[in-house]
Amino acid sequence: MTDPLPDPAPDAVAARPFGPALALALRGRCPACGEGRLFAHFLKPVPACTHCGQRWDLHQADDFPSYIVILLLGHILVPLMIEVNSAFAIPLGWQAAIWPTLAFLLAVAMIQPVKGGVIAFQWTRRMAGFR
């Protein structure tokens, strides 16, 4: 049996450039149109854009945004801890309070933009249901 709706030819498919889509998604805007919101709640995307109708419930980001945030935190905090410890004599008790708190605050600040970036990447590459 043949497919009633074959995929359009590759040259007929509208381009989805990653750079502009990423810039919009990092700000929580719809990567398709830039007008609608990407997130309904802190990490839950809207089912569809209220402006252009692009569905966002098709994404499959899973744990990838968390892995990216952990990788970024390591590259930010470890050099910072080394430099701070070499420049200042901060007592260990204070460090035990400072570094986990800073890690938590940075992780919370980065997770939504990173998830938006992953969704934008999937959308531009037509992955995970974004055909």
Image (cartoon, rainbow, N blue to C red):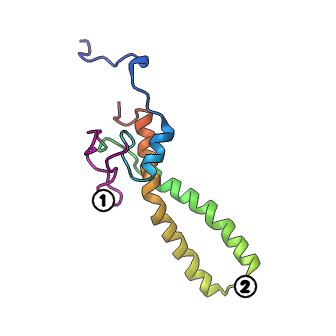
Q: CA distance from mark 2 to mark 1?
A: 41 Å
At mark 1, the secondary structure is loop
Q: Which dot marks residue 31?
A: none
Residue under pointer 1: 41
Q: What's the amino acid at mark 2? A: Ala
At mark 2, the secondary structure is loop
Q: Which residue is situated farthest in the top direction here?
A: 1
Q: Residue at x 48, y 60 (%)?
A: 110
Closer-to-camera residue (76/16): 16
Q: Residue at x 32, y 55 (%)?
A: 44
Question: Residue 60 sits in which quadrant?
Answer: top left
Q: Position of residue 62 (x, y in %)?
A: 40, 49
Q: Position of residue 93 (x, y in %)?
A: 61, 87
Note whether 74 is above or below 121 in the view shown. below
Which residues make up the magenta segment?
Answer: 34-55
Note whether 68 is above or below 89 in the view shown. above
On whether residue 54 falls in the magenta region, the answer is yes
